[in-house]
Image (cartoon, helix red, strand yellow):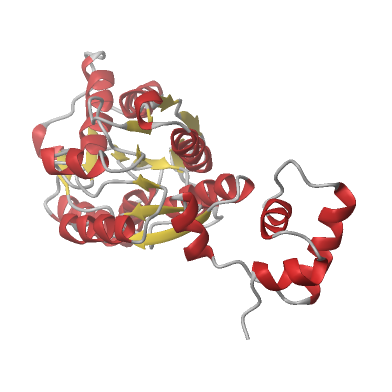
Amino acid sequence: MTVTIKDIAEKAGVSYATVSRALNYKYGVNPSTRRQILEIASSMNYSPNAIARGLVKKQTHTIGLIIPDITNPFFPEVARGVEDMSEKMGYSIFLCNSNWDKTKENRYVKLLIEKRVDGLILAPSASVITEEDRQIYSRLPVVLMSGVQSGSGTSSVVVDNVKGGYIAGKYLIEKGRKKLCYIGGAEDSFSVKERFEGFFQAAESSISVSLSPDLVKFGDYRQKSGYRIMKELLENRNIPDAVFASNDLLAIGVIQAIRASGLKVPEDISVIGFDNIAAAGFGEVELTTIEHPKYRMGELAAGILLEKIDLKPEMQENKRVVLEPELIIRRTA
């Protein structure tokens, strides 16, 4: 049998309103009365009806989080930052994986709105924010993460991809590398383009370095894509002396292809990745990479979203936070 506030009120000899204030830790309840009510609620195994409470308060204390690839170690670290910050503030998370599918992503957005989440954090599967997206985002507080250009119409937390690409290129040039290669994820990805832009700027700044169009390749974001692209370059004898991959999974695939061909990293070919996922530091990899503040990104996105939820719509302001990348030097470059 379900225990209600009415049952607790009758046993405590107080009003329903007093029980409600006590259970929700609101003012106006004598400390000893609150303690008595909480003890009675605990002894009766009272569990609040979250759905009913949400309808009354027009808040469910839940937020939606949509990421594009749960198998990429980058995104679970971001999700952990979102979850930790949300939990501190008394919110629970609905986690969805779009698998880089825009249709699936939109379906999840609509589902989460139907579930009456108080807000939404989204790492978009596509770089272009459409008018339909903006209409959806106008229905509740939204914060976008990673690979989002300015002017998205909502708050966002990103890393400075151009600077990260430039740092990678400059370091390789300083190490004496002259024939550079860029291997990126999806060619239409905003973050992939920005990382290439920074890398290209570094190459352009040195007269002794080349970055020819046939050494600029795109695939997807997975390890096997890096392996396939690098294997094709090596088989065609189009061999660079340095590779910058737009994420660590691609870079690890690149390293595997180089070693499988009998060449050495970094003696023959240097490799730099981007993200600094946990696997980048493993002994068999020891990947030089660009640190992407993953946990901090999730933590900040959640903080901004919860701040927006607490404000009336007319008081909400869009914020754009740009995080600083950092070069992490290991053995591959």
When the figure is inspected, residue 207 is found, relative to residue 149, above or below; the finding is above
Image side of residue 89 versus residue 250, left or right: right
Residue occupying image coordinates x 27% and y 46%: 124
The x, y position of residue 319, in whole percent, is 38, 25
Displayed quadrant of residue 316: top left
Q: How many marks?
A: 0
Q: Is any atom of residue 127 visible in this view? A: no
Displayed quadrant of residue 155: top left
The C terminus sits in image quarter:
top left
The x, y position of residue 234, in whole percent, is 19, 52
- For the view shown, which residue lies furthest in the bottom direction? 1
Q: 330 or 220: which is nearer to us?
A: 220
Q: 86 or 184: which is nearer to us?
A: 86
Displayed quadrant of residue 228: bottom left
Image side of residue 221 versus residue 313, left or right: left
Residue occupying image coordinates x 14% and y 48%: 237
Residue occupying image coordinates x 47% and y 47%: 78
Residue occupying image coordinates x 27% and y 27%: 199
Q: 183 or 150: which is nearer to us?
A: 150
Q: 292 or 79: which is nearer to us?
A: 79
The N terminus sits in image quarter:
bottom right
Q: Is any atom of residue 180 visible in this view? A: yes
Image side of residue 9 versus residue 63, left or right: right
The x, y position of residue 5, in whole percent, is 66, 67
Image side of residue 142 versus residue 181, left or right: right
